[in-house]
């Protein structure tokens, strides 16, 4: 059973930084794509950044230049370095992992970690 566990959320002032981590259990777990999403109250879940197993990354315009996604395949851990945080970054942040199989794609989600940015 694969589990994703996020950590690193908290309360930070605007302009500050946080680093989120997402640890994946399962020694044979090797996702093709991992990503970070967030969901603010009353809003839809938003894709922020993805990283392929080979290291290729993509970012949403809202976080480009401020957030950096990275992964340590040996440790099965995903990271999100968040700099220059703004109050509008306040949300619950989720990590996601996708495993591509011949006939389907399996999705795994963490439980979420709260990030609150005060003005």
Image (tube, rainbow, N blue to C red):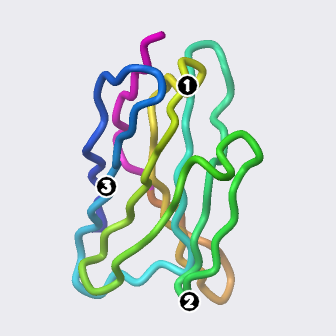
Pick whichever of labels 2 and 3 is earlier in the sequence: 3
Tell me the residue that label 2 is attached to: 54
Magenta highlight: main SS: strand
Pick whichever of labels 3 and 1 is earlier in the sequence: 3
Dot 2 lies on which element?
loop
Dot 1 lies on which element?
loop
**x and y percent of residue 79 in the render?**
38, 60
Which residues are the magenta region? Answer: 109-119
Distance from label 2 to label 3 (Cα)?
19 Å
Which residue lies at the image location 68% right of the left edge and 51% below the top edge? 64
Which residue lies at the image location 37% right of the left edge and 49% below the top edge? 110
The residue carrying pointer 3 sits among few (fewer than 14), some (14 to 19) or many (20 or more) residues within 10 Å by Cα, namely many
Q: Quadrant of residue 76?
A: bottom left
Q: How many marks?
A: 3
Is 116 in the magenta? yes
The residue carrying pointer 1 sits among few (fewer than 14), some (14 to 19) or many (20 or more) residues within 10 Å by Cα, namely some
- Mark in the foreground, 3 or 1: 1
Q: Are marks 2 and 1 in contact (CB under 8 Å)?
A: no
- Relative to the observer, which residue lies in front, 23 or 71? 71
Compared to 81, does 13 lie above or below?
Answer: above
Compared to 88, does 119 lie above or below?
Answer: above
Tell me the residue that label 1 is attached to: 86
Dot 3 lies on which element?
strand
Tell me the residue that label 3 is attached to: 21
**x and y percent of residue 105 in the render?**
62, 72
- Mark in the foreground, 2 or 1: 1
């Amino acid at each position: 059973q694969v589990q994703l566990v996020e950590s690193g959320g908290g309360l930070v002032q605007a302009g500050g930084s946080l680093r989120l981590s997402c640890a994946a259990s399962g020694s044979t777990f090797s996702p093709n794509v991992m990503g970070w999403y967030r969901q603010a109250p009353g809003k839809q879940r938003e894709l922020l950044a993805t990283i392929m197993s080979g290291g290729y990354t993509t970012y949403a315009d809202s976080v480009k230049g401020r957030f950096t996604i990275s992964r340590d395949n040996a440790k099965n851990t995903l990271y999100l370095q968040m700099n220059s945080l703004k109050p509008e970054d306040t949300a619950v942040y989720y990590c996601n992992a996708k495993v591509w199989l011949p006939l389907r794609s399996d999705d795994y989600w963490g439980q979420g970690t709260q990030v609150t940015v005060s003005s």
